[in-house]
Image: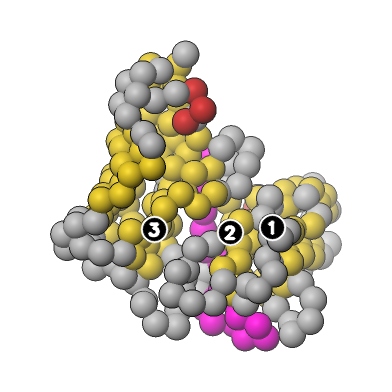
Amino acid sequence: GQQVMQIPQYQHVQEGEDFTTYCNSSTTLSNIQWYKQRPGGHPVFLIQLVKSGEVKKQKRLTFQFGEAKKNSSLHITATQTTDVGTYFCAGQWDAGNNRKLIWGLGTSLGVNP
Amino acid sequence: NAGVMQNPRHLVRRRGQEARLRCSPMKGHSHVYWYRQLPEEGLKFMVYLQKENIIDESGMPKERFSAEFPKEGPSILRIQQVVRGDSAAYFCASSPPGPKNIQYFGAGTRLSVL
């Protein structure tokens, strides 16, 4: 079945270091979304990527969608303690009526001050 | 515009009882999704509903679990005869009509089965 693999599962960094999480899909995606979940909280939408090779930036966060629309990455430059949380990618296959997202298992980011 | 509202926030049930979880989507949203999350784990898709219709229930166990999204009122996830393994956080999300399938999540219901 359709799967989204996300690595690494956990990462701890010193404040100021960079961080990257990667997602890979078994099949071509219609689009991919990224969400952040703070400890004890609920997932919050960050961004959606639709086009092949798309790159989007939000302040210190850079999101990429691969040329084949099968992989994606989220890069955080100079992490801060406010970046702590779990980052999920979620892929959509069906551009039609089924809007179901398939979720990666998430990357849990810890930041040491 | 109020966000996605889930209640109760915490629910304690004994084995064999029924659990009823409610989700009111954001105003104007016609798509509702239910997810289950175990501690330190990812989100597991359960069911996707659009007003009065179940679109995809491939992630929902065939027995004891059911979901509905009536024309009026909130979406309900119902778990009959709960077992300890049902203890988890259950999140509901909603999305607006249109091509941008962005999901807005509620705060979740933490179900504990004693």
> In which image quadrant can residue B22 be found?
bottom right
- Give the residue number, with chain letter if any, for mark 3: A48
**Dots 3, 1 in contact, CB < 8 A:** no
* Amino acid at pointer 3: Gln
Element type at mark 1: loop
Left-right relation of A47 to A70: right
Left-right relation of A90 to A27: right
- Give the residue number, with chain letter if any, for mark 1: B3
User: What is the crowding at mark 2: few (fewer than 14 residues within 10 Å), some, or many (at least 20)?
Assistant: many
Left-right relation of A103 to B81: left
The front one of B51 and B88 is B51
* Amino acid at pointer 1: Gly
- Which residue sits at x=44%, y=35%? A108
Element type at mark 2: strand
Magenta-drawn stretch contains B42: yes
Question: Which numbered disc covers residue B104?
Answer: 2
Can you give x and y, in whole percent of width and height, for residue A89 in the image?
A: 39, 52
- Examine the rendering and report whether any part of residue B86 can be seen: no
Q: Earlier in the sequence, mark 1 or mark 2?
A: 1
**Subunit ID for the residue under disc 1:** B
- Which residue sits at x=79%, y=76%? B73
Q: Judge whether B111 appears above or below B97 on screen.
A: above
Quadrant position of the N terminus of chain B in the picture: bottom right
User: What is the crowding at mark 1: few (fewer than 14 residues within 10 Å), some, or many (at least 20)?
Assistant: some
